[in-house]
Image (tube, rainbow, N blue to C red):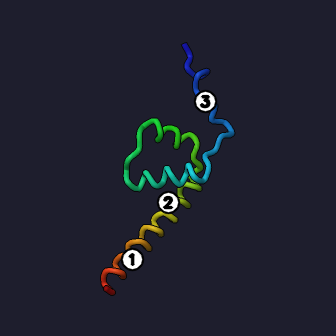
Amino acid sequence: MNDDATKPSVVGRKASLGQTARAVFWSFFGVRKRKHYESDAAHLNPIHVIVMGVIGAALFIVLLVSIIKFVVLR
């Protein structure tokens, strides 16, 4: 029996900005279920993932620098 009829069509479906941000956020922790990973691989735009990854890394660095400055200046 062919299971293709029960799978949702991925043609023309793209993940929203929020879904992309959520996938990148969880990837920073390395915690992702296989089913979510497969869904991300089918729906996420690689360019959006790269952009969100760079933004996430920049925000993380700014957060760390801010915490360090706060602690050192106290």
* Image point (41%, 39%), residue name: 33
Q: Secondary structure at mark 3?
A: loop
Q: Secondary structure at mark 1?
A: helix
Q: CA distance from mark 2 to mark 1?
A: 18 Å
Q: Looking at this rendering, what residue extends furthest in the front direction?
A: 74
Is 72 situated left or right of 26 in this image? left
Q: CA distance from mark 3 to mark 2?
A: 27 Å
Q: Quadrant of the N terminus?
A: top right
Amino acid carrying mark 3 in the image: Pro
Amino acid carrying mark 1 in the image: Val
First-in-chain label (3 vs 1) = 3
First-in-chain label (2 vs 1) = 2
Q: Nearer the viewer, mark 3 or mark 1?
A: 1
* Image point (39%, 77%), residue name: 65
Total numbered labels: 3
Q: Which mark is residue 44?
A: none
Q: Mark 2 sits on what residue?
A: 53
Tags 3 and 2 in contact by the CB under 8 Å rule?
no
Q: Which mark is residue 65?
A: 1
Whole-percent x and y of residue 27? Answer: 43, 52
Amino acid carrying mark 2 in the image: Gly
Vertical side of 13 occupied by 8: above or below: above
Q: Which mark is residue 8?
A: 3
* Image point (55%, 51%), residue name: 20
Q: Nearer the viewer, mark 2 or mark 1?
A: 1
Q: CA distance from mark 3 to mark 1?
A: 44 Å
* Image point (52%, 42%), residue name: 41
Q: Residues within 10 Å of mark 1 (few under 14, many from 20)?
A: few
